[in-house]
Image (cartoon, helix red, strand yellow):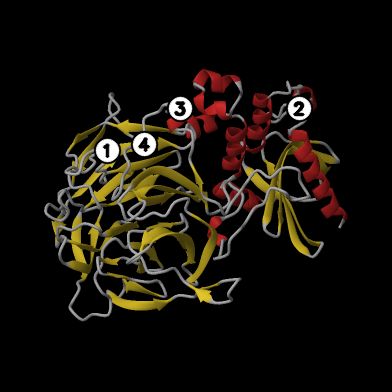
């Protein structure tokens, strides 16, 4: 209990130190006490303190679990492996303290805290584990439960991380920056630094007789949009196409339709390197030469990539619907058909569904036709070992008010994103036969158990698109708002897993010191933000 008390006291001290005057500079190289110097009590020096505390490799030094006031409380102490000072009896190092209490998580970052050198030995496997994860929690261990973080926890004066809420990304239009059109039927992908949106339909901004053959890029931390020039074999049928991101840098597009929908369709595969523009900033599209048994010319299909294969399921030509499954070998670019629909099969055809790969199976989520939509109590899954369809029953979420078990309503034109570890998906929005939806659900794939978040999309949406970063932030962009076909170019963000320490520290800085996003390279140098953070988050 004494150790627990020390950690809580240290956490409170951290919260007070970060906002106080006379704090000491923390260097990311081994330093002695003589190298510390007082900093001015201004915003830039405080953020330098926080960045320095998390800029190096991080290891768990201590963990304490206890019950306080009937509430299970866990306190983690993480320490940067850089900036250590050792003596025969004490160790001083920059630390981050995280207190998890019930549904609250509080983060505090301190310049240096000392503890007895023999209190905890850092094992090499822990170092390797934390270097590999480079963050706070392993999102792959997150079961179907949710975390809700409040800002009024009594143990710390500040809470820096809010989860279980989805927020609009603001200020882009207020800064007079260029914005993409109000879209539907587009597709988005995420890298660690950018969100990319390609294609879609924008009758109010582009015209009713045209699709949007444009690539837009949103910078997560500068909060600005940029239209990327295109060249090469640029795809033209780009409404309700399917996209995937290969190796974190190659955008792959398959299928799609032009206007009028269904009259002109594509089955071609295109790709472009997002991180390799020419001297004018343009990306080059390439149309693949494929072989084998290619799919039909369709739109509204779903694709996913696993290992060396791209899997495609379903789609429509505007009149007929399919649940055929094709696989493209990405190395030799050869198609093969794994399953084809036969009238009367138990898995009905559909379009505007979503798919995910898990444990050698392809799961299909929702979708439908203009007259019918499919639900989520039983998920169709294609067993890739046998190429046979099976029905996988899911477990419902128990509504705390009614006590009933619930699963998401049937829908199509929704979004599904899969975590980087592959263990869970997040479903948002969509439309059933009569109602546009705004609910958000998580499905834990190992157990097939649903959980409904207590937050909702700010607006009811369908024909939108979503993507997730490797650190677990889901972005939702565009979509149709209502039965009058009004469209949106709003962008929403939601952390569905706890971010890394680096992401947390950057978020603190951006919230409190928003001028960071307007700074150029020289100005960022002057406030001593570490180089790797400048490169990762602020490179143009």
Q: Which type of secondary structure does the marked residue at label 4 adopt?
A: strand
The quadrant of the picture occupied by the N terminus is bottom right
Q: Is residue 158 left or right of residue 132?
A: right
Q: Which residue is tagged 2?
A: 24
Asked if 487 appears above or below 337 in the picture, the reply is: above
Which dot marks residue 205?
A: 1
Given contact means CB atoms under 8 Å apart, are the residues at marks 4 and 1 in contact?
A: no
Which label sits in the foreground, 2 or 3? 3
Q: Marks 2 and 3, Cα distance to the nearest angstrom?
A: 35 Å
Q: Is residue 181 left or right of residue 35?
A: left
- Report the residue at 36% width, 30% height from top: 178
Estimate how packed mark 1 is, as few (under 14), some (14 to 19) or many (20 or more) residues with alpha carbons within 10 Å: few
Q: Which type of secondary structure does the marked residue at label 2 adopt?
A: loop
Q: Which residue is tagged 4?
A: 217
Residue farthest along the front direction in this orientation: 484
First along the sequence among labels 4 and 1: 1
> Which of the 4 image quadrants contains residue 359?
bottom left
Which dot marks residue 175?
A: 3
């Amino acid at each position: 209990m004494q150790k627990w008390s020390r950690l809580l006291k240290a956490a409170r001290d951290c919260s007070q130190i970060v906002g106080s005057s006379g704090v000491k500079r923390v260097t990311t190289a081994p330093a002695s006490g003589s190298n510390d110097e007082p900093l001015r009590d201004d915003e830039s020096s405080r953020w330098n303190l926080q960045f320095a505390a998390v800029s190096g490799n991080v290891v768990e030094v201590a963990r304490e679990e206890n019950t306080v006031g009937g509430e299970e409380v866990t306190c983690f102490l993480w320490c940067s492996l850089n900036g250590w000072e050792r003596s025969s009896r004490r160790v001083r190092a920059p630390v981050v303290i995280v207190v998890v209490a019930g549904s609250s998580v509080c983060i505090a970052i301190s310049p240096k805290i000392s503890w007895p050198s023999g209190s905890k030995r850092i094992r090499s496997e822990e170092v390797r584990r934390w270097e590999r994860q480079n963050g706070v929690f392993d999102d792959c261990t997150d079961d179907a439960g949710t975390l809700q973080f409040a800002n009024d926890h009594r143990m710390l004066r500040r809470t820096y991380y809010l989860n279980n809420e989805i927020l609009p990304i603001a200020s882009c239009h207020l800064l007079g920056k260029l914005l993409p059109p109000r879209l539907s039927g587009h597709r988005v992908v995420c890298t660690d630094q950018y969100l990319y949106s390609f294609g879609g339909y924008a009758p109010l901004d582009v015209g009713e007789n045209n699709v949007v053959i444009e690539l837009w890029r949103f910078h997560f931390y500068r909060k600005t949009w940029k239209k990327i020039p295109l060249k090469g074999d640029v795809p033209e049928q780009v409404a309700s196409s399917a996209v995937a991101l290969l190796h974190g840098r190659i955008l792959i597009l398959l299928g799609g339709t032009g206007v009028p929908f269904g009259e002109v369709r594509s089955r071609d595969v295109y790709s472009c390197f997002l991180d390799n523009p020419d001297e004018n900033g343009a990306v080059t599209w390439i149309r693949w030469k494929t072989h084998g048994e290619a799919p039909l010319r369709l739109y509204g299909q779903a694709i996913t990539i696993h290992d060396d294969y791209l899997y495609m399921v379903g789609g429509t030509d505007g009149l007929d619907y399919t649940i055929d499954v094709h696989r493209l070998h990405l190395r030799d670019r050869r198609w093969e058909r794994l399953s084809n629909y036969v009238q009367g099969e138990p898995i009905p055809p559909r379009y505007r569904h979503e798919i995910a790969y898990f444990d050698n199976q392809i799961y299909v989520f929702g979708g439908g036709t203009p007259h019918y939509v499919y639900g989520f109590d039983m998920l169709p899954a294609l067993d890739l070992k046998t190429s046979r369809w099976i029905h996988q029953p899911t477990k419902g979420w128990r509504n705390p008010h009614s006590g009933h078990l619930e699963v998401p309503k049937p829908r199509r034109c929704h979004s599904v994103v899969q975590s980087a570890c592959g263990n869970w998906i997040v479903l948002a929005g969509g439309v059933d036969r009569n109602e546009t939806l705004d609910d958000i659900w998580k499905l834990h794939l190992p157990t097939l158990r649903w959980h409904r978040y207590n937050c909702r999309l700010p607006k009811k949406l369908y024909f939108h698109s979503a993507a997730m970063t490797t650190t677990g932030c889901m972005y939702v962009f565009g979509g149709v708002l209502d039965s009058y076909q009004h469209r949106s170019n709003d962008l929403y963000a939601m952390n569905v897993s706890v971010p890394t320490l680096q992401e947390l520290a950057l978020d603190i800085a951006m919230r409190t010191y928003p001028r960071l996003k307007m700074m150029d390279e020289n100005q960022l140098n002057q406030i001593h933000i570490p180089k790797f953070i400048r490169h990762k988050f602020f490179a143009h």
